[in-house]
């Protein structure tokens, strides 16, 4: 098939190019983890939108690029949600339509130095607004935020302690805008280069100023990862395997043992035998055990996913019920309308129930822990609030067994590095089937990952830290700054439009003539 000579004028070719351009950033995330590619991955998409013949076409380029981005970053959902994945990508992709229009508005033709400077502020702000909106749990949550591609870059993690993942997204988009101008508009290269230099100077200053976590001792924390266990009576067999692996930790002086999400498939009040076995394990290893119960509760209606702390005398009473559920995986939004999703994919047959508040637990040995469950680790505000409430260690209990042979387990494990760096608190990411990982207070990896092929337990020496990071103290200030920039733009555009209406002269209307008027003597 031959491409038309002016392919940019062909709707089909242009739409295909937009989808492919939007999909490019996927390579910056795990599993490839080409973090450096994030700084140029948006350039083809930007060049396409700026060349659009009309603002409407640029908005289409933004929408189709957003579709490609969401579909690529979440491609591992296809086996579970099938056509629903494409539908969700199309709906979320529409969030980028205004961003595509803004790209053309500021970068079309030969932009002046002022337009380039404005673009370096407005376009990253527009991108952050898209990330903010799609971070709402009902729209799928903040999985695949562009800044999270920098999870293994030490300078970027330092910046995350200042402004969270939002600051990293702003930085990455800013660099992409400057590079796009450098390669496409020769007359505007100097302002684009000046923008790059200013961005480098600002980020270097923030990097140098950002405080380092003050290390304050450490704890030995064990992860129990039983591996994939399917088939008949899988709940009992999984518990047996976890019990076996936990027994092996005796004598290793651990301070806490963490099991993965859905590690216990029965309510402990209904199964006192399991509660007694857990208490015996806790006494044997000399540490509390944090399990995750995925079962119908005996004290209230519905199924909950709950982090439950068990000590030598049984459950301690500390319990956290998962608050933010996975759309379609753990509940179906508007089930009366979308319930048919259960017939075409692996959607939830029954909605899980939500918890009402986050919990900081006293896990013994003077350790205060803040548990989260599954994709709650994608939400920066949850870990920040736990750090504010006094958690010394952040804990994530997860299970990505449904997506075992995909990029999802590594993507999920990488998020914990950002949460640790943002809060200045170490984070333990414990899973049923891998990838399990531990990160220090600066987001640095502690020990090795436990891969998806492993069924084992591992002990990590986790450094503790004190102090408060700027991100914990000031919150999502990059988002607030972006909203202020966009509000200023809207105000300026409104004032400009008003002034144009005031300065355009009204057309002169000749005086009306009546049948009795004389052409030579009007009015007579």
Image (cartoon, rainbow, N blue to C red):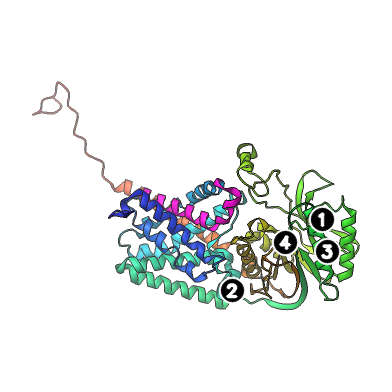
Characterize the local packing of mark 1: few (<14), some (14-19) or many (20 or more) Cα atoms within 10 angstroms: some
- SS of the residue under disc 4: loop
Q: Position of residue 105 (x, y in %)?
A: 37, 55
Which quadrant of the figure has residue 131?
A: bottom right
Q: Is residue 443 above or below residue 380?
A: below
Chief SS of the magenta region: helix
Q: Position of residue 26 (x, y in %)?
A: 51, 62
Residue that mark 1 sits on: 236
- Left-right relation of 115 to 272: left
- SS of the residue under disc 3: helix
In depth, the one of 162 and 474 nearer the eye is 162
Residue that mark 4 sits on: 432
Residue that mark 2 sits on: 158
Mark 3 in CB contact with mark 1 (< 8 angstroms): no
Q: Is residue 401 above or below residue 172?
A: above
Residue that mark 3 sits on: 243
């Amino acid at each position: 098939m031959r491409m038309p000579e002016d392919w940019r004028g062909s709707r089909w070719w242009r739409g295909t190019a937009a989808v492919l351009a939007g999909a490019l950033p996927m390579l910056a995330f795990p599993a490839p983890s080409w973090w450096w590619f994030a700084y140029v991955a948006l350039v083809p998409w930007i060049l396409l939108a700026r060349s659009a013949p009309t603002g409407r076409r640029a908005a289409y380029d933004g929408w189709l690029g957003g579709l490609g981005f969401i579909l690529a970053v979440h491609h591992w959902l296809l086996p579970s949600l099938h056509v629903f994945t494409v539908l969700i990508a199309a709906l979320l992709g529409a969030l980028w339509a205004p961003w595509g229009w803004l790209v053309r508005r500021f970068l079309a033709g030969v932009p002046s130095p002022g337009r380039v400077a404005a673009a370096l502020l407005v376009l990253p702000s527009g991108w952050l607004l898209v990330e903010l909106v799609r971070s709402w749990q009902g729209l799928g949550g903040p999985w695949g935020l562009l800044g999270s591609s920098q999870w293994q870059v030490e300078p970027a993690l330092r910046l995350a302690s200042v402004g969270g993942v939002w600051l990293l997204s702003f930085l990455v988009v800013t660099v992409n805008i400057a590079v796009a101008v450098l390669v496409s508009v020769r007359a505007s290269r100097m302002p684009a280069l000046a923008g790059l230099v200013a961005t480098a100077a600002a980020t270097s200053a923030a990097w140098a100023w950002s405080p380092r976590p003050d290390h304050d001792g450490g704890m030995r924390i064990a992860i129990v990862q039983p591996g994939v266990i399917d088939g008949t009576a899988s709940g009992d067999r999984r518990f047996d395997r976890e019990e076996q692996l936990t027994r092996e930790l005796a004598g290793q002086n651990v301070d806490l043992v963490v099991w993965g999400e859905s590690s216990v498939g029965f309510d402990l009040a209904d199964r006192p035998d399991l509660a007694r076995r857990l208490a015996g394990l806790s006494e044997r290893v000399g540490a509390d055990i944090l399990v995750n119960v995925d079962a119908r509760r005996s004290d209230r209606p519905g199924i909950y996913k709950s982090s439950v702390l068990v000590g030598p005398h049984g459950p301690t009473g500390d319990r956290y019920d998962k608050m933010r559920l996975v759309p379609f995986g753990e509940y179906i939004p508007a089930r009366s309308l979308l319930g048919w999703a259960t017939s075409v994919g692996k959607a939830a047959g029954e909605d899980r129930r939500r918890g009402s508040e986050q919990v900081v637990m006293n896990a013994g040995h003077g350790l205060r822990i803040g548990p989260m469950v599954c994709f709650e680790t994608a939400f920066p505000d949850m870990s920040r609030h736990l750090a504010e409430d006094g958690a010394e260690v952040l804990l994530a209990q997860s299970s990505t067994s449904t997506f075992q042979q995909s990029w999802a387990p590594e993507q999920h494990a990488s998020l914990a590095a950002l949460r640790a760096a943002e809060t200045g608190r170490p984070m333990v990411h414990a899973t049923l089937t891998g990838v399990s990982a531990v990160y220090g207070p600066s987001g640095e990896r502690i020990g090795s990952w436990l891969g998806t092929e492993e069924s084992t337990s591992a002990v990590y020496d986790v450094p503790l830290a004190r102090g408060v990071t700027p991100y914990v103290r000031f919150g999502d200030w990059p988002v607030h700054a972006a909203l202020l920039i966009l509000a200023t733009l809207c105000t300026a555009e409104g004032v400009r439009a008003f002034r144009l209406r005031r300065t355009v002269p009204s057309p002169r209307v000749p005086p009306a003539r009546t049948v009795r008027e004389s052409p030579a003597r009007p009015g007579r």
